[in-house]
């Protein structure tokens, strides 16, 4: 074996590991009943939602949940503040005041699920954790989670996802978190009110495979390119602020359904890195580490802080679409004589995967669901045909 081959072999082996990290088997195609969300008891958490009326946003405290609507108090009306950021309004009421409102509510109103807005933050710079559930780690032989940036605006609970030719669009259901203050330290996290909401993390796996850092998969390079975009971050309708976030996550479930078939199911209490650890590592790396995104190097955050306009995506469970490439494909990559030859093999693999039609296609409906965070409905649509 020549020294050139040896030089290529290390990143090729890394690619094999990378594929194992990324690719899991889809779940059974059996039809399943999508569970209805349940309101977290007020003794455990306060639950909020938002509705928009023209140019005004009302933040609501949810008291009841049914299959067709929620019953809620308009906190914006009580507090005299209509802000697009729910936490601006929530911070007007401490836990004791919210408890009192729940015991003796003033005027309440019913709101249809379809009228609820998304409860995500207003920025586009978010932190995400990869391979952060043991079941996924066991499948792919990895027990370590890693972080990477995601650049996307938060959409609402009813959204459209564009699938263009040549992409391998995949789904991931996640628990997201946001905070009522800027976090510059773990002490800030411990003092903050943390809100959890359901989110989706759509990924173009073709872009991911082509942009992986083969020498260091856990660097997270390539993930920002694959997962960022204007339509790849839908968020749910409920923002839940628990009294004990660790206890709350132990009872929280998240699921994915594609055309009525359940593909993913995970318990949030099974995360490898918990939310506090993710925050601590993010702040520790903010000023010293960069990631590759659109052929540039970017920091996780623009400053050594997690702002109120950012979210933390805590990872997904097993059951995504990707499958590990077969042995012949891996051998061809590992024995390629140059990087150009490697990319030729990778492009052939991608073309074959796309031809199978197993990734998200126009006409598919994806539903993310949770027992306490509501649901997200995404319709997959084709990319617009360029005008000649």
Image: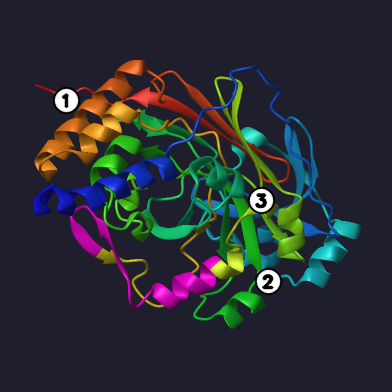
Single out the mark in the foreground, 1 or 2. Answer: 1
Decide: is 188 above or below 7: below
In three-dimensional space, the C-alpha distance between marks 3 and 1, rounded to whole angstroms, equals 42 Å
Question: Can residue 69 be spotted in the picture?
Answer: yes
Crowd tier of the residue under label 1, counting other residues whose Cα lies within 10 Å: few below 14, some 14–19, many 20 or above? few
Name which residue lies at 46% across and 56% down.
Answer: 128
Quickly name the residue at label 3: 268
Q: Quadrant of residue 210?
A: top left
Looking at marks 3 and 1 on the same chain, the residue that comes earlier in the sequence is marked by 3
In three-dimensional space, the C-alpha distance between marks 2 and 3, rounded to whole angstroms, equals 29 Å
Name which residue lies at 79% across and 65% down.
Answer: 98
292 inside magenta stretch: yes
What's the mark number on residue 6?
Answer: none
Single out the mark in the foreground, 3 or 1. Answer: 3
Crowd tier of the residue under label 2, counting other residues whose Cα lies within 10 Å: few below 14, some 14–19, many 20 or above? some
**Span colored in magenta:** 278-297
Name which residue lies at 38% across and 50% down.
Answer: 152
Decide: is 339 above or below 30: below
What's the mark number on residue 92?
Answer: 2
In three-dimensional space, the C-alpha distance between marks 1 and 2, rounded to whole angstroms, equals 49 Å
Single out the mark in the foreground, 2 or 3. Answer: 3
Looking at marks 1 and 2 on the same chain, the residue that comes earlier in the sequence is marked by 2
Furthest residue in direction right, as rendered: 103
Q: Nearer the viewer, residue 68 or 229?
A: 229
Q: Nearer the viewer, residue 210 or 249?
A: 210
Name which residue lies at 76% across and 48% down.
Answer: 72
Residue 346: image location, x then y, percent? 22, 34
Residue 305: image location, x then y, percent? 44, 76
């Amino acid at each position: 074996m020549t020294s050139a081959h040896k030089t290529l072999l290390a990143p090729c082996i890394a690619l094999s590991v990378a594929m194992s990290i990324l690719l899991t088997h889809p779940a059974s195609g059996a039809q399943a009943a999508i569970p209805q969300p349940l309101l977290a008891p007020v003794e455990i958490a306060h639950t909020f939602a938002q509705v928009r009326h023209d140019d005004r946003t009302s933040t609501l405290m949810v008291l009841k949940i049914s299959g067709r609507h929620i019953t809620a108090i308009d906190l914006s009306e009580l507090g005299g503040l209509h802000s697009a950021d729910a936490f601006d309004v929530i911070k007007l009421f401490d836990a004791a005041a919210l408890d009192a409102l729940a015991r003796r509510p003033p005027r309440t109103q019913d709101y249809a699920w379809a009228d609820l807005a998304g409860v995500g933050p207003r920025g586009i710079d978010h932190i995400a954790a990869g391979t952060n559930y043991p079941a996924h780690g066991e499948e792919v032989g990895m027990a370590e989670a890693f972080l990477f940036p995601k650049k996307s605006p938060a959409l609402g609970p009813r959204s459209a996802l564009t699938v263009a030719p040549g992409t391998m669009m995949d789904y991931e259901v996640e628990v997201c978190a946001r905070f009522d203050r800027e976090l510059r330290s773990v002490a800030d996290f411990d003092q903050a009110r943390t809100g959890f909401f359901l989110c989706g993390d759509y990924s173009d796996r073709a872009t991911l495979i082509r942009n992986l850092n083969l020498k260091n998969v856990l660097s997270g390079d390539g993930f920002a390119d694959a997962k960022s975009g204007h339509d790849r971050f839908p968020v749910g309708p409920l923002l839940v602020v628990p009294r004990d976030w660790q206890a709350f996550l132990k009872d929280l479930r998240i699921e994915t359904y594609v055309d009525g078939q359940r593909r993913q199911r995970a318990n949030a209490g099974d995360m490898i890195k918990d939310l506090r650890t993710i925050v601590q590592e993010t702040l520790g790396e903010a000023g010293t580490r960069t990631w590759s995104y659109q052929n540039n190097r970017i920091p996780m955050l623009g400053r050594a802080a997690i702002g109120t306009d950012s979210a933390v995506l805590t990872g997904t469970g097993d059951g995504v679409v990707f499958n590990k490439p077969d042995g012949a494909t891996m051998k061809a990559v590992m024995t390629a004589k140059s990087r150009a030859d490697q990319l030729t093999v990778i492009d052939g693999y991608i073309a074959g995967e796309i031809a199978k039609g197993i990734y998200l296609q126009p006409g598919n409906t994806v539903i993310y669901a949770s027992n306490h965070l509501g649901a997200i409905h995404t319709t997959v649509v084709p990319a617009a045909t360029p005008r000649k």
